[in-house]
Image: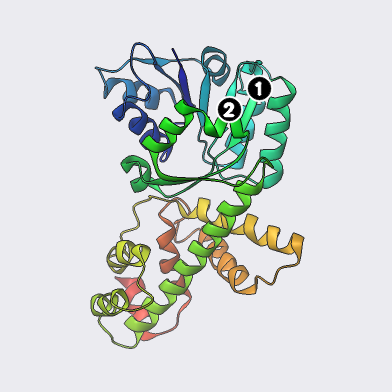
Amino acid sequence: MTKIGFIGLGIMGEGMANCLLKDAVAGTPESPLIIWNRTSAKSENLKASHPDKTIEIKSSAKDVVSSCDIVFSMLSTPEASAAVFDDATNGTLAGVSTSSVIIDCATLAESDMKRMSDQVTAKGGKFLEAPVSGSKGPAHGGQLIFLCAGSKAVFDDATVQAALDAMGKASHYFGEQVGKATRAKLVVNSLMGTMMAAFGESLALAESLDLDGSKMLQVISQGAIASPMFALKGPKMLKKDHAPNFPLCHAHKDMKLAVDAAKSVGTEYSVTQVAEETFRKAREDEELKVANEDFSAVFEKIHKESKSDYSKKRKLG
């Protein structure tokens, strides 16, 4: 009997846990899903929405780890991850033993992942970093892309593979050196953020030139620059719909980590750095208040900073 744990049931974690239950990788009497979330109501809601599944709610991250064979963790920020992992009394590390397997799916600084891995392995446990490419929709639909590094034995484990298959459409292993998966994730997310900033500027320019935004989205979708992200986000951006799938504050965090990584190895990254600065300004704008909106809300900052007649009128709309 394999007991699977899940720590963190936020925008991403809730969907991921649901996928484990849906595919019966966990949530059976033989393999219960054991959960904990900083806000207990989310744990209660998950259990209530699956009355036919075996779900156990624990009072701390430590209790989840000490009760499970394999634990997935998906916390929203480096601060949240550190607070939960490092809590000497009730944290993740406090529950680690020689039988523990910790799989961390957050996007953190490379140094954070390495530190956690070192601390887990020092207690005899095994560690796999597995940040994901994808947002709320893919998390709920089991369409995430897992970027993994660390213990090959953990990555190859049949139960772990079944879990990754339930939650994602692909899993990539970058080797035993913890940190490489985080590097891959930062490359992906910094490119995504830069694409969004450029897309937002192009849409703002189109509107300011008195071009129909919806028509321009059709044109973009039919050429070499077509992108699933543009197709998904574009219509919502034109309607000022930025309901969060990937919060802007999280996107900016990842872009800043990527810019810092580029500086550390001497890579020219000026285009991304300008995009990161645009996201930072949007995140810090107290008038717009879009930090917790979808990262597409950088579009609102672009329009706010624009001086075109269209942008001025849009601000009043």
Query: Where on the picture, by quarter, is residue 272?
Result: bottom right
Where residue 44 appears, x then y in whole percent? 35, 21
For label 1, the SS is: loop
Identify the image's colour scheme: rainbow, by chain, secondary structure or one colour: rainbow
Query: Where on the picture, by quarter, is residue 200?
Result: bottom left
Examine the rendering and report whether any part of residue 83 can be seen: yes
Callout 1 crowding tier (Cα within 10 Å): few <14, some 14–19, many ≥20: some
Distance of mark 1 from mark 2, alpha carbons?
A: 8 Å
Where residue 126 appears, x then y in whole percent? 64, 26
- Given residues 145 and 204, the one toward you in this image is 145
**Residue at left offset 34%, top offset 52%:** 243
Examine the rendering and report whether any part of residue 253 can be seen: no
Question: Label 2: which residue?
Answer: 102
In the image: residue 304, left or right of residue 50: right
Labelled pair 1, 2 in contact (Cβ < 8 Å): yes
Question: Label 1: which residue?
Answer: 125
In the image: residue 273, left or right of residue 264: left
Q: Earlier in the sequence, mark 1 or mark 2?
A: 2
> Which residue type carries mark 1?
Gly
Q: Which mark is residue 42?
A: none
Question: Is the N terminus in the top left, top right, bottom left or bottom right quadrant?
Answer: top left
**Residue at left offset 60%, top offset 19%:** 100
